[in-house]
């Protein structure tokens, strides 16, 4: 039994390290993009349009992953696209987490009318199709990085609120909370000092998952051409372009897609790995 | 009696939720920048033309008055007139609804088959390397959303090995003899296998993209539920009677393991329907979602309103049906 558990832990460990490794690499790419990109991501050259990746015939030196239909370097655009993706993941993920978790904690611990208002609001929010809602919001706020972050926060706070509410409710019913109150802690104090630390592991897991979701939402919005200005390279924008020319130049779609795929997978595996780490039974 | 009261309460909260959605959508889209009326008229239009058309669509009144007029119409089945196509919103939306419903239901069926198969196989092979492989595949299917699966499928079966169509609902050159917009069902009813196959080969990839994450969830929950059921005495008893392991799992354990999975599938099904918006766009499938994105891009306010309300009705409706089905199927609640 102990052996089996060790095996499980090793497998989890590998998964955790691989995901963390990929995300670190991506973060470095995002920060260093202007210095490590082989070409200017915006430079167009119609004579160099639709160059295939380096292992195929008819390439030009320096264009490792080929070029798109306007002759822009795919690798440089992926590296620059990482800046938008990582910014959205970190900023939108964190903001969504703070707002959603706060509302969930308040609803779950205070109960009563606070819970009723927040829960009803969550129900209404969940009745919107999220993708349509985000597209609508971007149409209202206008394009731009700030707008995307705002749209993600406005839509996804319910993910945190629902789960954290249920967990805070479960924790609130436990003996240690009652004894803290008997020992003379106020309600706010109990909530922040006693309940919050016990809900925190769950919040961290949700935050990791949310970062992956934020990257996808940004990609979807760029895909329907509502994200940032069309000049800035984004993975979703590259995918949208690649989708239209998929029969002539598959690499324009494949490379950003692989990058996005690995990133989303890493965020969720990181979340799952952390969940298992926090699980006292496995630990 | 208790069940009756619970149903009434549930209907009331549904009504509150829907009214909330209506108010929020109405307010949000009134602040959209960009004048839809100016976009409708040819470039040479005068200010009077703009004013007349604005008054015609009721956009000159206060938001509160506009809401009352619109809500009054909605209660009578009038959702207003689309600004871009100048046709009644209700007709447009209902015309597209069958396409989206067929796609969602097909995805649900695929997800149930794959997920159920994975759960039963995983249980049958428990403790082996194959079970671990199924778990890993499940984990991957779960963590990657439908949008990315759609792109992967386009590359695999649209480009690399082009066996299925990657855009549209039917081949445009085909003359359809249909009277309804339920193409898939009608092609079956009219016994036209040629048309049926054309429609299915268009729907398969988008439906699969929607189905993969849901299949993973069904597989996971059903397997967990089967695992608990397999420890029960009656399952052990049937095993001692000499039935094969596959028979024990599918005939004895499965019927009791399904109920816990059902609630979750219902909630997840609404997420799947929400996912059709982007998947329809990705595959240029002429359903509600694709229409919704066009409506947002064209600032067609009445149409956006109609579509969002319809989605909200479907979402809350599915949740309501699942809750009632669970209450009806669960003997402890039924006789409570």
Image (cartoon, coloured by chain):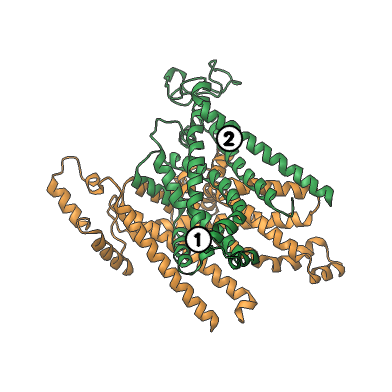
Chain colours: A green, B orange
At horizontal 51% and vertical 21% (from top left) the residue drawn is: A35
Judging by the rendered image, the residue that carries numbered circle 2 is A258
Residue found at the very far bottom of the displayed protein? B1
Residue found at the very far front of the displayed protein? A184
Image spot of residue A227 (x, y percent): 41, 39
Q: CA distance from mark 1 to mark 2?
A: 40 Å
Mark 2 neighbour class, 10 Å CA radius: few under 14, some 14 to 19, many 20 or more: few
At horizontal 54% and vertical 61% (from top left) the residue drawn is: A165
Task: Tell whether B158 sits left or right of A227.
Answer: right
**Which corner quadrant of the image does residue A17 belong to?**
top right
Q: Are marks 1 and 2 on the same chain?
A: yes
**Which corner quadrant of the image does residue B117 belong to?**
bottom right
Please give the label number shown on residue A106.
1
Image spot of residue A41 (x, y percent): 46, 24
At horizontal 63% and vertical 55% (from top left) the residue drawn is: B217
Image spot of residue B234 (x, y percent): 80, 72
Looking at the picture, tell me which residue is in the foreground, B179 or B58.
Answer: B58
Looking at the picture, tell me which residue is in the foreground, B122 or A26.
Answer: A26
Task: Tell whether A147 sits left or right of B217.
Answer: left
Looking at the picture, tell me which residue is in the foreground, A251 or B320.
Answer: B320
Asked if one can make out residue A32 in the rendered structure from this viewpoint, the answer is: yes
Q: Earlier in the sequence, mark 1 or mark 2?
A: 1
Q: Nearer the viewer, mark 1 or mark 2?
A: 1
At horizontal 56% and vertical 58% (from top left) the residue drawn is: A163
Image spot of residue A272 (x, y percent): 65, 48
Q: Is residue B265 above or below residue A29?
A: below
Please give the label number shown on residue B264.
none
**Mark 2 residue element:** helix
Looking at the picture, tell me which residue is in the foreground, B186 or B60.
Answer: B60
Quadrant of the drawing holding the C terminus of chain B: bottom right
């Amino acid at each position: 039994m102990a052996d089996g558990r060790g095996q499980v832990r090793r497998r989890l460990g590998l998964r955790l390290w691989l995901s963390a490794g990929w995300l670190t690499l991506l973060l470095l790419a995002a920060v260093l993009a202007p210095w490590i990109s082989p070409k200017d991501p915006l430079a167009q050259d119609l004579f160099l349009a639709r160059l295939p990746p380096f292992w195929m015939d008819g390439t030009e030196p320096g264009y490792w992953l080929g070029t798109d239909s306007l002759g822009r370097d795919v690798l440089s655009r992926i590296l620059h696209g990482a800046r938008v993706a990582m910014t959205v993941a970190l900023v939108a993920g964190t903001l969504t987490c703070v707002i959603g978790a706060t509302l969930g904690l308040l609803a779950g611990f205070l109960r009563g009318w606070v819970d009723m208002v927040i829960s009803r609001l969550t129900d209404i929010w969940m009745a919107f199709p999220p993708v349509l809602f985000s597209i609508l919001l971007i149409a209202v706020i206008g394009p731009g990085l700030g707008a995307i972050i705002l749209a993600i926060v406005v839509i996804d706070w319910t993910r945190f609120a629902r789960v954290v509410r249920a967990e805070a409710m479960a924790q609130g019913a436990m003996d240690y909370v009652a004894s803290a109150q008997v020992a003379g802690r106020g309600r706010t104090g109990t909530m922040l000092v006693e309940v919050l630390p016990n809900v925190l592991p769950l919040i961290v897991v949700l935050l990791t998952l949310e970062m992956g979701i934020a990257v996808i939402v940004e990609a979807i919005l760029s895909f329907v051409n509502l994200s940032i200005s069309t000049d800035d390279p984004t993975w979703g924008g590259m995918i949208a372009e690649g989708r239209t020319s998929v029969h002539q130049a598959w690499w324009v779609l494949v490379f950003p897609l692989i990058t996005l795929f690995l990133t989303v997978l890493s965020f969720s595996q990181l979340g799952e790995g952390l969940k298992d780490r926090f699980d006292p039974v496995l630990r | 009696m208790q069940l009756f009261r619970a149903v009434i309460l549930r209907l009331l909260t549904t009504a509150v939720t829907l009214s909330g959605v209506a108010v929020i959508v109405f307010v949000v889209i009134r602040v959209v920048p960009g004048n839809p009326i100016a976009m409708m008229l040819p470039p040479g239009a005068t200010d009077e033309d703009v004013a007349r058309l604005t008054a015609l669509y009721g956009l000159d009144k206060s938001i509160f008055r506009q809401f009352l007029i619109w809500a009054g119409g909605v209660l009578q089945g009038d959702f207003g007139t689309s600004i871009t196509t100048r046709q009644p919103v209700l007709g447009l939306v209902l015309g597209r609804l069958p396409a989206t419903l067929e796609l969602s239901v097909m995805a649900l069926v695929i997800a149930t088959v794959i997920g159920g198969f994975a759960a039963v196989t995983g249980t049958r092979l428990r403790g082996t390397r194959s079970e671990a492989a199924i778990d890993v595949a499940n984990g991957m299917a779960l963590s990657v959303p439908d949008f990315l699966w759609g792109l992967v499928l386009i590359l695999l079966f649209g480009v690399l090995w082009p066996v299925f169509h990657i855009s549209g609902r039917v081949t445009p050159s085909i003359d359809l003899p249909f009277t309804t917009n339920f193409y898939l069902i009608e092609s079956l009813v009219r016994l036209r296998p040629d048309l049926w196959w054309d429609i299915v080969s268009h729907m398969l990839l988008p439906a699969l993209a929607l189905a993969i994450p849901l299949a993973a969830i069904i597989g996971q929950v059903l397997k967990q539920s089967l695992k608990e059921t397999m420890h029960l005495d009656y399952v052990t008893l049937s095993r001692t009677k000499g039935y094969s392991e596959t028979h024990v799992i599918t005939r004895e354990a499965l019927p009791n393991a399904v109920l816990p999975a059902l609630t979750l599938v219902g909630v997840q099904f609404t997420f799947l329907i929400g996912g059709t918006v982007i998947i329809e766009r990705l595959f240029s499938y002429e359903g509600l979602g694709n229409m919704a994105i066009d409506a947002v891009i064209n600032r067609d306010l009445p149409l956006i309103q109609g579509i969002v309300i319809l989605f909200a009705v479907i979402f809350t409706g599915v949740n309501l049906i699942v809750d009632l089905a669970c209450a009806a199927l669960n003997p402890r609640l039924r006789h409570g």
